[in-house]
Every structure is written in structure tokens, then in C-alpha cells.
Amino acid sequence: MVLDKPANESKRKAGLHPYLEELMTLDIQELWDLASSLDKYLECYMLAGVQMNIGVANQGL
């Protein structure tokens, strides 16, 4: 027996950005690796911002 996809699913998928469609094809390990790399990337920028704020505070600005 073949089941058709619900009509709203095809409409939902048609409006997705290509990178979101690609994310839907990844397995759990690939998603975990991606999340881990994003976390490290954001942490680096957050630490750079903190260092900049400390530098500004030390200058008394």
C-alpha cells in the first residue's frame, strides 16, 4: 500500500530555504557535529566581544 504525502507537507517543503532542506537530510551524528562547530564558532566571537568590552572598560571609556 502506497501512502501519499499530505498536501500541507509539500507546501511546507516548497517554501523552505535550500539549507533547511539540506539539514532535513542529515543524520543525527552530522547534525551533532554541525551544532558543535557552530557552538565553537559562536563562543570565539563571544569571547572576542568580552575581551573588547574589558579593553574599553580598562581605558575608562
Image: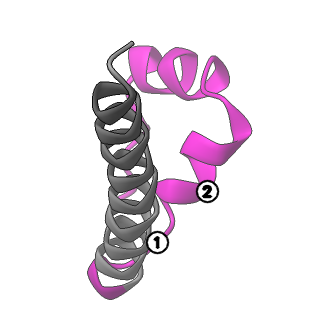
Q: Between 61 and 44, which is closer to the camera in this rendering?
A: 61
Find disc 2 in the rendering and name its residue: 22
Does residue 34 lie above or below 61 as drawn? Answer: below
Here the colouring is one colour
Which residue is located at x 72 percent, y 40 percent?
Answer: 18
Proximity of marks 2 and 1: CB atoms separated by less than 8 Å: yes
Please state, as top left, top right, bottom left or bottom right, where the C terminus lies in the image.
Answer: top left
At mark 2, the secondary structure is: helix
Question: Which residue lies most toward the bottom here?
Answer: 29
Which residue is located at x 41 percent, y 81 percent?
Answer: 30
Q: x, y percentage for residue 47? A: 33, 54
Which residue is located at x 36 percent, y 48 percent?
Answer: 51
Query: Which amino acid type corresponds to the residue marked 1 in the rendered image?
Result: Leu
Residue 58 lies in quadrant = top left
Residue stretch rendered in magenta on the structure: 1-29
Residue 39 lies in quadrant = bottom left
> In the figure, is residue 28 to the left or right of 10?
left
The verdict on residue 21 being magenta is yes
Query: Which amino acid type corresponds to the residue marked 2 in the rendered image?
Result: Glu
Please state, as top left, top right, bottom left or bottom right, where the N terminus lies in the image.
Answer: bottom left
At mark 1, the secondary structure is: loop
> In the figure, is residue 5 to the left or right of 39?
right
Does residue 17 lie above or below 43 as drawn? Answer: above
Find disc 1 in the rendering and name its residue: 26
